[in-house]
Image (cartoon, helix red, strand yellow):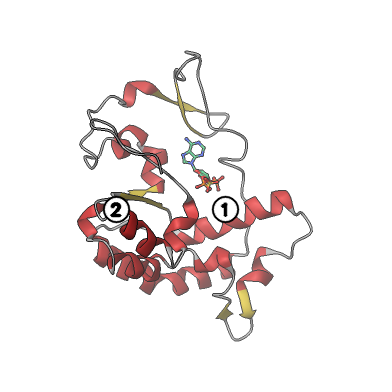
Amino acid sequence: MPRTLDGQITMEKTPSYFVTREAPARISAMSKDTKLIVVVRDPVTRAISDYTQTLSKRPDIPTFESLTFKNRTAGLIDTSWSAIQIGIYAKHLEHWLRHFPIGQMLFVSGERLISDPAGELGRDFLGLKRIITDKHFYFNKTKGFPCLKKAEGSGKPHCLGKTKGRPHPEIDRDVVRRLRDFYRPFNLKFYQMTGQDFGWDG
Ligand SMILES: Nc1ncnc2c1ncn2[C@@H]1O[C@H](COP(=O)(O)OS(=O)(=O)O)[C@@H](OP(=O)(O)O)[C@H]1O
């Protein structure tokens, strides 16, 4: 990590930090004052998104439905499958809270990042001047997501690339329902821990 000078904020992002056991202790040993931003979305959609990403690289993998269960008849979910495991946010957060106070963490709603990007980005956490507002975004109907009206440098409209916002495969409704039931208690715990209701459970 480069040295941060006065008036600078050094940032680093990797989605897997949140679920890596060693990460909280290591980051805390580097700097106890580090502020942490976690973007979370409905864990069921997250699992399907994760699967879609793997499928795009390895089209021969088994179906989402078969990977979800250890034993489908018994309804036993395979929590060792990373696509499922990562969405148990309350468990991961417990590890972080052994090293950081909750006030040093910001939980960003992945859903609101799409429905109201400027509002979600504008939440006060890093003490930055609010520069990005609604005026900087437009909704791109083809992409189905908000995009920037003018990208930095080029001044042209800019959407995220093809690997962001891929169409998801249709998943068996019963499997989705069982996953919702599986995640509900962990989601409720996560809402309690963060003091935020992310609205994933109706
Ligand atoms: N503006 C905009 N445009 C496109 N996509 C958007 C946008 N805002 C949020 N998203 C959502 O970001 C999801 C991909 O982000 P990831 O966290 O999976 O990316 S990463 O590869 O882990 O860095 C991606 O997930 P999928 O829809 O499953 O592809 C999107 O839902």
Give the crowd class for mark 2: few <14, some 14-19, many >=20 residues within 10 Å.
few
Give the position of the N terminus as an image quadrant: top left
SS at badge 1: helix
Up-down relation of residue 125 to residue 200 (above or below): above
Q: Quadrant of residue 76?
A: bottom right
Q: Position of residue 105 (x, y in %)?
A: 27, 53
**Mark pair 1, 2: CA separation:** 33 Å
4 vs 92, left or right, is: left
Q: Position of residue 57 (x, y in %)?
A: 72, 50
- Tell which of 115 and 59 is nearer to you: 59
Up-down relation of residue 97 to residue 145 (above or below): below
- Tell which of 135 and 102 is nearer to you: 102
Q: Residue at x 62, y 45 (%)?
A: 167
Q: Residue at x 57, y 74 (%)?
A: 80
Q: Position of residue 29 (x, y in %)?
A: 32, 60
170 vs 193, left or right, is: right
Outermost residue, right side: 60
Q: Are marks 1 and 2 in contact (CB under 8 Å)?
A: no
Confirm if mark 1 falls within 8 A of ligand 1.
yes
Label of residue 31 in the image: 2
Q: Residue at x 21, y 40 (%)?
A: 124
Up-down relation of residue 18 to residue 81 (above or below): above
Amino acid at circle 2:
Ser
Q: Residue at x 57, y 53 (%)?
A: 49
- Tell which of 99 and 129 is nearer to you: 99
Q: Mark 1 or mark 2: which is in front?
A: 2
- Inspect this view and state whether residue 195 appears: no
SS at badge 2: loop
- Inspect this view and state whether residue 78 appears: yes
Label of residue 49 in the image: 1
Label of residue 198 in the image: none
